[in-house]
C-alpha cells in the first residue's frame, strides 16, 4: 500500500523548522561565545563597537558626536551598546522560537500560545547569565535576564502582530490562514 504524498505546506513547514532551529542554535552559540569572553576582552570589543558606531553615525548625520573625545561618554555609549545587543539578541531568539509554532499553526490550524516559546528562550537567557558567573571578571545579572525577557517579549509580540495582520488579510481574501 502506498503512503499518501506529503502536502506541500507540510514540507515547507519542515524545511522552515529546520532552518529556524539552525538559526536559533547559531545565534545562541554566538551569545554563548561572547559571554565566555573575560571582562577586559569583552569591554574592549564593546568599546570598539561603540567607537565604530559613533563614526558611522557621524558620517551618516554629518555631525560631530561628543563620544570620540570623552572616555566617560564613550563608556556610557558602550553600556548602551551592550544592553541594546542583549535586547536585540533575545528579541530575535524569541521571534525565531515563536515563528516555528506559528508556522505549524498555519499548517495544522490549531490554537497556539507564545508562552512555551517565551519560557524556552527565557531559560536560555538564564543559562547564559549562570554561565557568565564562571567567566573571569564577569557576573550573572538578574537585570540582564529581565532585559532579555523584555527582548523576548518584543520579538514574540512583533511576530504575533504580523501573524494577526497576515491572518486577517488571508481571511478577507476568503482563504484559510
Image (cartoon, rainbow, N blue to C red):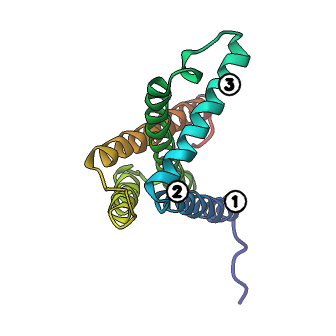
Label 3 vs 2, first from the N-terminus: 2
- Is residue 173 shown to the viewer in this render? no
Q: Which residue: 37% across, 61% down? A: 132
Residue placed farthest to the top in the image? 63
| x then y, percent, for residue 141 | 29, 50
Front in this rendered view, residue 127 or 136: 136
Q: Which image quarter: residue 17? A: bottom right
* Marks 3, 2: nearer the viewer: 3
Q: In this figure, which residue is indicated by the disc labeled 3?
A: 55
Most foreground residue, 124 or 68:
68
Towards the viewer: 73 or 174: 73
How far apart marks 3 and 2 lie (CA) works out to 23 Å
Name the secondary structure under disc 3.
Answer: helix
Q: Which mark is residue 161?
A: none
Quadrant hosting residue 30 = bottom right
**With 120 as the anchor, is 101 left or right in this view?**
right
Q: Which mark is residue 34?
A: 2
Residue indicated by mark 1? 12
Amino acid at each position: 500500500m502506498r503512503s499518501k504524498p506529503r502536502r506541500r505546506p507540510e514540507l515547507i513547514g519542515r524545511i522552515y523548522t529546520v532552518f529556524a532551529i539552525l538559526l536559533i542554535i547559531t545565534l545562541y552559540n554566538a551569545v554563548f561565545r561572547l559571554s565566555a569572553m573575560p571582562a577586559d576582552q569583552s569591554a574592549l570589543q564593546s568599546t570598539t563597537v561603540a567607537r565604530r558606531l559613533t563614526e558611522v553615525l557621524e558620517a551618516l548625520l554629518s555631525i560631530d558626536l561628543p563620544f570620540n573625545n570623552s572616555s566617560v561618554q564613550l563608556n556610557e555609549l558602550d553600556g548602551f551598546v551592550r544592553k541594546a545587543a542583549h535586547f536585540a539578541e533575545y528579541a530575535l531568539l524569541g521571534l525565531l522560537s515563536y515563528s516555528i509554532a506559528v508556522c505549524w499553526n498555519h499548517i495544522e490550524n490549531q490554537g497556539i500560545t507564545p508562552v512555551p516559546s517565551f519560557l524556552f528562550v527565557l531559560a536560555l537567557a538564564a543559562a547564559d547569565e549562570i554561565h557568565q558567573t564562571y567567566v573571569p571578571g564577569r557576573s550573572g545579572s538578574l537585570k540582564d535576564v529581565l532585559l532579555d525577557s523584555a527582548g523576548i517579549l518584543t520579538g514574540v509580540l512583533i511576530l504575533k502582530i504580523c501573524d494577526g495582520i497576515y491572518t486577517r488579510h488571508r481571511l478577507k481574501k476568503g482563504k484559510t490562514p
